[in-house]
Amino acid sequence: QVQLQQWGAGLLKPSESLSLTCAVYGGSFSVYYWTWIRQPPGKGLEWIGDINHGGNTKYNPSLKSRVTISVDTSKNQFSLRLSSVTAADMAVYYCARGLPYGMGSYLDYWDQGALVTVSS
Amino acid sequence: EIVLTQSPGTLSLSPGERATLSCRASQSVSSSYLAWYQQKPGQAPRLLIYGTSNRATGVPDRFSGSGSGTDFSLTISRLEPADFAVYYCQQYGSSFKTFGQGTKVEIK
């Protein structure tokens, strides 16, 4: 059974950098697109970006200047870094597995999510 | 950017009734690249449908998806208590994958 588990700082001050890591347990690591999504409190889902095992990334254009997604295939982990956070970045952050389908990938496994609060 | 607009925002129905949720895209989406997710309060989203009409593993057959081009829909044939939740569509055919804003299915 595939499980994803993330960790990172849950409370940040404005202008600090958000850093989250997601570990993948079970299943192959090399085939998939490893994805970050976020959800502000009471709002909908926002796709942040994804990365494949080769390190090829795609990002949400609205976040691209501040986002870095990286992968460590030796540990079956991938990470999110978001610089210069503001209150608008406060959200539940999810990591998920993107299963390739044709030229795209849909999200078949998600972690439980982690709330990141931004407050001075 | 492909914008997905879901309607209605909220659907108030009783158990046993049929629910039809709409997802309209700002430009054509290949039917291979449209998914639906269910989210309950305090939980992560769960994949229901991929490729417009393919049910994910373990999804009951009362859930069905259809559509093409810019108009897609999710139908729940007979609502059960566990189905009251928020539903999101997602397109994953472009480099920038986007979600709709969600439809809440609530108990009437």
Image (tube, helix red, strand yellow):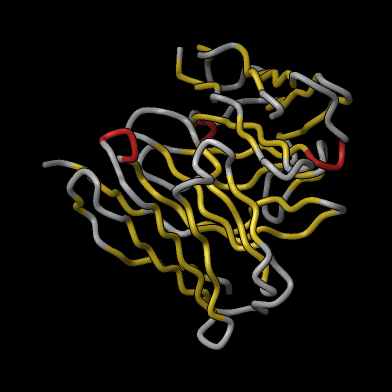
Which residue is painted at 55% across and 42% down in the image?
A: A47
Quadrant in the picture for residue B78 = top right
What residue is shown at x 69% (from left), y 67% (from top)? Answer: A32
Instruction: Residue at 69%, 29% (x, y): give it.
Output: B1
Residue A49 is left or right of residue A92, and the answer is right
**Location of residue B74 with respect to A48 vertically, above or below:** above
Q: Residue furthest left?
A: A120
In the image, A58 versus B30, the foreground residue is A58
Q: Which quadrant of the structure image shows residue B48?
A: top right
Residue situated in front as seen by the camera: B23 or A53: A53
Residue at the bottom extreme?
Answer: A74
> Residue B41 at x, y = what percent?
38, 37
Residue A94 % position (x, y): 45, 52
**Quarter of the figure that contains the C terminus of chain B:** top left
Residue A21 vertical placement versus A13 (above, below): below
Query: Horizontally, is B30 left or right of B25 in the view?
Result: right
Rendered location of residue B52, percent (x, y): 81, 36
Decide if residue B35 is on the left or right side of residue B32: left
Q: In the rendered picture of this protein, how many numbered marks are placed on residues?
A: 0
Residue A28 position in % (x across, y down): 67, 79
The one of A63 and A7 positioned closer to us in this rendering = A63
Please name the residue shown 49% across and 28% down the image.
Answer: B84
**Considering only vertical position in the picture, is B88 above or below B71?**
below
Q: Pick the residue in front: B21 or A22.
A: A22
